[in-house]
Amino acid sequence: MLIDNIVLLRARFPEIRNYFLEHENKIELNRLTILESKTGAKTIRYQTTEGNPLMIHSLYDPIREAERIITAHSESIMEDTHVFFYGVGLGYHIEKFKEMYPSNTYSIYEPCPEVFFELTQQRKLNQLITKKTLQLYIDTYEKEAMSYLKEFVSSNQNIYIITLPSYENLFKEKMIQFRSNVKKVITNRRSRLHTNEKFQKRWTINSVHNFKSVLTTPNMMKDIKLEQFKRKPAVIISAGPSLVEDMEFIRYIKKNELANIFSVGSAINSLLEYDVIPDAVCTYAPSDNNYKVFERLNDSGLHDIPLIYGSSVGFETLEKFTGPKVHFITTVDNVSQYFLGSQINANDCINDATSIAVLMVQLLSEIGCDPIIFAGQNLAYKDDELYAKGIGYTHLKNGFNKEIIKKGVPIKDVYGNEIISNITFNNMRESIEQIVTHYKGNTFINTTKGGAEIKGVPFCPIEQVIEEVLTHSIIKEKWWETANSYDQSVLSDKLNSLENYMHQFYNIIENINKLIRKLNKNIALKNRINLEKAFGEFDYLYSNLNENMYYRKFVVPYVRVHVDFLINEMNHIVMEADPIKKANHIVELFTRFIQNCRSAGVELEQLINEQIDRQLISSKIN
């Protein structure tokens, strides 16, 4: 490795330098041959594992080839495009990009450590790596450099990938995996962004509305006698199309009290259609029409089936539900977490997820149910249907069409056949797999005929489960008839503190607005000295904002999409060396953000005053 390259890597990417320092004697360069091209520029011949010699760069004119590579992508590279280079080789195409687009940022990924090491012996890295190079990723012998995915998750810029063409053949399997990884994280990010945009306000609005219900209903994690559930089987009934096939077996389980039966989401309507009554119904969806799931149950006269609800559920659901209620605190409910304080710790909260079934796997595992059995958990289409018969919602489409097939996600079913799922259900499957891994001591069984294969949850037909696992009855009690144990005497002080935090919040907001005006003035004067001083003041105010409890617990969740965007942009602000450019970026970014925060603060203050007033808290204390 050239001395200049050692110095550069030590300064910019020390972990890469350390890796090669430790493995330099182990690096095998016998697959690589340095050749001189017809025009005199160096090129590399690579011997594949199949024994085929392939050129990484042109054997005739690598420089001209590099220009053609970058020019071919010119229509996709805009002023704010961040380019991600997959494959370095000797870096001619990156050097050409740097010349053609000196203002654009870029990152570099080399999947073959031998090639990168050879590069460091042949050329100076400062010909490729500049201040505009955000990241350098090198695969090691032990593992793929997965840290590159963070760029696709956290960057607000448009990221455009340029692959060194020879790598399509040289490292075909790695390329396939790379593209799969990037596609997955981008899809998940878009899905998460869509969810946040749709529900960011609803989560907090629901939590504020529902707090009075939280104060008057038992907590499933803290107040219920867990002897009812520990080491006893539980069946999670979902609304997949396979549910109907096993309905008579579920009826048998209920009649003989072989397990606790929990209906999640819309499954209750299919159960009612077949006159099967669960031991509890469960919900968490934050939408304003979630109450429709239980309209049939509310109208049925069955008012003794408890509702287990996540505390951020659509508040209309609780207002309209006619039976007993039991709650659990969700991680997106910052309202209950603030007011109840140390009475709720991290282990008492259930992680928000893509479906109530996923949350219930967590909840039932935490309270000791074992085994946990899935029924109707298809997580895919079956016989052209996505939901069980009896659901009956006009807003739910239950058919198969060409568009669904086109956008579908192919997966394996419990028999090893390929079936079609969608992004939402596939994410649910992966979430269940992660939870199951966390609770390794538990037994999980999937009885869903033709449903998606769930790793860690072996398939077993429900009739076999009844014969081999559910061999005796369990004693069931009205476990939901118990008192709430929260100490509500602390609530008044919590409300007083929140009012103080609100006052501080508005003061910080006003001071940031004053600073923005000061920055604008010094930008116009091009006064770099005063701008540098103002940056220190900005850091202080921004730190105060992040420490403010009203901002952290109420405003941030309410505008989380704006906050995520801001955090991503702050990384670019920190890296900007020019005071005027840095100040302009701060002004542009924070002018909009502070406006959003102020509006959110006012809306939330009004909502809190309406729903969590002193009279309400005093009545709870008394």
Image (cartoon, grey):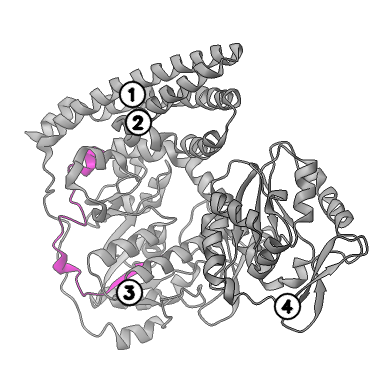
Label 3, label 2: how many angstroms apart (C-alpha)? 38 Å
Tell me which label, 2 or 4, sits earlier in the chain. Answer: 4
Give the structural element (helix, strand or loop) at label 1: helix
Q: Badges 1 and 4: C-beta atoms under 8 Å apart?
A: no
The N terminus - image quarter? bottom right
Residue sitting at 71 percent across and 37 percent down?
103
Give the structural element (helix, strand or loop) at label 4: loop
Q: Residue furthest front?
A: 3
Q: Observer-nearest residue: 495 or 81? A: 81
Label 1, label 2: how many angstroms apart (C-alpha)? 7 Å
Instruction: Tell me where residue 381 sits by quadrant.
Output: bottom right
Q: Which residue is mark 3?
A: 440
The C terminus - image quarter? top left
Tell me which label, 4 or 3, sits earlier in the chain. Answer: 4
Give the structural element (helix, strand or loop) at label 3: loop
Amino acid on which the number 2 mark rests in the picture: Tyr
- Eyeballing the image, is 513 above or below 247? above
Tell me which label, 1 or 3, sits earlier in the chain. Answer: 3
Circle 1 packing at 10 Å, graded few (<14), some (14-19), many (20+), is many
Give how far across and how far down residue 497 sits, in percent: 20, 28
Give how far across and how far down residue 280 sits, in percent: 27, 61
Label 1, label 4: how many angstroms apart (C-alpha)? 62 Å
The disc label shown at residue 31, or none: 4
Q: Observer-nearest residue: 263 or 583? A: 583
Give how far across and how far down residue 19 sits, in percent: 53, 65
Q: Which residue is mark 2?
A: 551
Label 4, label 3: how many angstroms apart (C-alpha)? 43 Å
The disc label shown at residue 505, or none: 1
Q: Nearer the viewer, mark 1 or mark 4?
A: 4
Amino acid on which the number 1 mark rests in the picture: Phe
Give how far across and how far down residue 363 sits, in percent: 29, 61
